[in-house]
Amino acid sequence: MFGSKEDVIFPKHDALLGRVEARLAGAVTHETRYVAVAEAARLVLLHYLQEGRWRGLGIG
């Protein structure tokens, strides 16, 4: 059976969202919030870069 459109476009999205939420939840001061947002964005970008590598190999 095929998954939803979202499953195809955003594979493993729930796990990534959990990692981003955990990183943002750890920010308690004004300064650490900026760092947390930058690190959360980095997590997302690295995730999509890694996904692109697999797709370039014909996997996934």
Image (tube, rainbow, N blue to C red):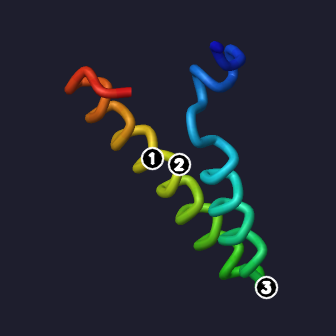
Q: Which residue sits at x=76%, y=80%?
A: 30
The residue labelled by disc 2 is 44
Q: Is residue 54 left or right of residue 33?
A: left
Q: CA distance from mark 2 to mark 3?
A: 21 Å
The residue labelled by disc 3 is 28
Identify the residue at the far front of this view.
1
Disc 2: CA contacts within 10 A as few (<14), some (14-19) or many (>=20): some
Residue 11 at what x, y percent from top left? 56, 33
**Disc 2 secondary structure class:** helix
The residue labelled by disc 1 is 47
Residue 23 at what x, y percent from top left? 66, 71
Q: Nearer the viewer, mark 2 or mark 3?
A: 2
Q: Circles 1 and 3: CB distance less than 8 Å?
A: no
Q: Circles 2 and 1: CB distance less than 8 Å?
A: yes
Q: Quadrant of residue 55?
A: top left
Camera-side residue of 20 and 39:
20
Identify the residue at the far left of this view.
57
